[in-house]
């Protein structure tokens, strides 16, 4: 029996998502001990220390199903974000929420519009439903919103915009975004993926939540995987018009967010100081990486996230491999159409130094 013949065409054409290489894998392969992983934009400080204090309590309850309505977490988010609870949809990571949106709105014949070099998950969820992904060329690695608008037709159901985008770290300004939203047909959803919102401090950066009242076709997604340091627990959410949330909640698995993640999310929201500390460490680290990469004569794409892409001017894979041999894991981004770039996440001051030293040894032996 050839099961491939009976699979959905959209699924057959997919290439599986390639995550950053896990530390344990490199340890197994090379027998190295001191490994620095700067490959998945995780928080180098880890989660709030309060989590350790409360973990045991949470585990005691794990024979029971989690609260499928995420009541407490939604209450807290509602207070902190100033949005109604019926605008919220929780997910097993924000990737889950992105997939829910795709499953609610897409079928074969529909299309989604994204920028060149956009986060690959948008393409994955689009194609898995048999819809078509349309890619708008970047201008200087930036999303071109006018060209994005021109790419929308009556079959376009979703425009995904990562702000800032991963892996480029580039972002769209508030004035440009508002002009764009005013011009997008009301039947096309605009999904603003704010996975890195906590790290951005530019005054021209738009607050997506503030635009929700004005644009009922806007959806903002956020995550606890980055600034909150909870990537392993999988927790994210969408803020949208209540009707969109209602539709997403109809197809959401009843227990898509586990009780560990729900409790950890609450605890994390109660320690804004920890997030602020991580943001400060990131700001400094980004400067160190930008300066160190410039010292090695490498061009960087200016980033407002917790990562930066740099141009090697040659196939990046051998450099990636050589860095692995030095015990440093970064991210090759050929699948994003950037085969000569590598993406490095901002680490602790020590990790940044180890990375820059290793890169220097690899490039100038
Ligand atoms: C990391 C990241 C996410 C977060 O995914 P989770 O499923 O919440 O871990 C979402 N969007 C972008 C662009 C990202 O880089």
Image (cartoon, grey):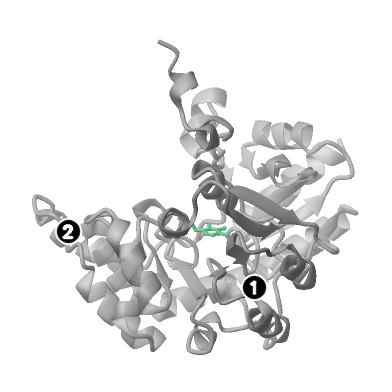
| Residue bearing the label numbered 1 | 283
Q: Dot 2: what SS? A: loop
Q: Nearer the viewer, residue 38 or 349?
A: 38
Mark carried by residue 66: 2
- Decide: is 33 above or below 134: above
| Picture quadrant of residue 83 | bottom left
For label 1, count other residues whose C-alpha is less than 10 Å away and answer few (under 14), some (14-19) or many (20+). some
| Picture quadrant of residue 349 | bottom right
Q: Is residue 49 visible?
A: no
What residue is drawn where x is 58% and y is 45%? 36
What residue is drawn where x is 49% and y is 45%? 129
Q: Is residue 84 visible?
A: yes
Quarter of the C terminus within the rendering: top right
- Say whether mark 2 is within 8 Å of ligand 1: no
For label 2, count other residues whose C-alpha is less than 10 Å away and answer few (under 14), some (14-19) or many (20+). some
Q: Nearer the viewer, residue 248 or 29?
A: 248
- Decide: is 152 above or below 71: above
Image side of residue 25 versus residue 175, left or right: left
Image side of residue 336 versus residue 272, left or right: right
Of marks 1 and 2, which one's residue comes earlier in the chain?
2
Q: Horizontal and vertical percent for residue 42?
A: 51, 56
């Amino acid at each position: 029996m050839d099961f491939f013949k009976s699979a959905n065409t959209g699924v057959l054409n997919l290439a599986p998502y390639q995550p950053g290489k896990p530390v344990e894998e490199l340890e197994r392969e090379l027998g190295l001990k001191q490994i620095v992983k700067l490959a998945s934009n995780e928080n180098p400080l880890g989660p709030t220390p309060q989590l350790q204090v409360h973990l045991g309590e949470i585990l005691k309850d794990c024979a029971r199903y989690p609260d499928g309505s995420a009541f407490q977490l939604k209450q807290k988010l509602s207070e902190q974000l100033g949005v109604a609870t019926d605008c919220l949809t929780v997910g097993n990571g924000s990737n889950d929420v992105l997939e829910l949106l795709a499953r609610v709105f897409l079928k074969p014949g529909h299309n989604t519009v994204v920028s060149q070099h956009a986060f690959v998950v948008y393409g994955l969820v689009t194609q898995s439903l048999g819809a078509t992904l349309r890619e708008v060329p970047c201008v200087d690695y930036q999303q071109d919103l006018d060209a994005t608008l021109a790419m929308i037709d009556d079959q376009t159901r979703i425009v995904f915009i990562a702000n800032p985008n991963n892996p480029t770290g580039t972002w769209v300004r508030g004035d440009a975004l508002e002009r764009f939203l005013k011009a997008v047909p009301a039947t096309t959803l605009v999904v603003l993926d704010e996975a890195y919102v906590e790290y951005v401090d530019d005054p021209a950066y738009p607050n997506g939540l503030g635009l929700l009242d004005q644009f009922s076709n806007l959806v903002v997604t956020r995550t606890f995987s980055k600034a909150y340091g909870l990537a392993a627990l999988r927790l994210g959410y969408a803020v949208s018009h209540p009707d969109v949330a209602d539709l997403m909640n109809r197809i959401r698995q009843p227990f898509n967010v586990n009780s560990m993640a729900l409790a950890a999310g609450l605890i994390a929201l109660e320690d804004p100081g920890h997030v602020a500390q991580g943001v400060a460490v990131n700001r400094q680290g980004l400067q160190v990486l930008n300066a160190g990469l410039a010292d090695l004569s490498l061009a960087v794409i200016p980033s407002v996230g917790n990562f930066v892409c740099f141009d090697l001017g040659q196939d990046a894979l051998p450099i990636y491999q050589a860095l692995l041999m030095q015990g440093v894991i970064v991210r090759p981004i050929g699948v994003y159409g950037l085969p000569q770039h590598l993406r490095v996440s901002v680490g602790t001051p020590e990790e940044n130094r180890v990375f820059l030293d290793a890169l220097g040894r690899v490039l100038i032996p």
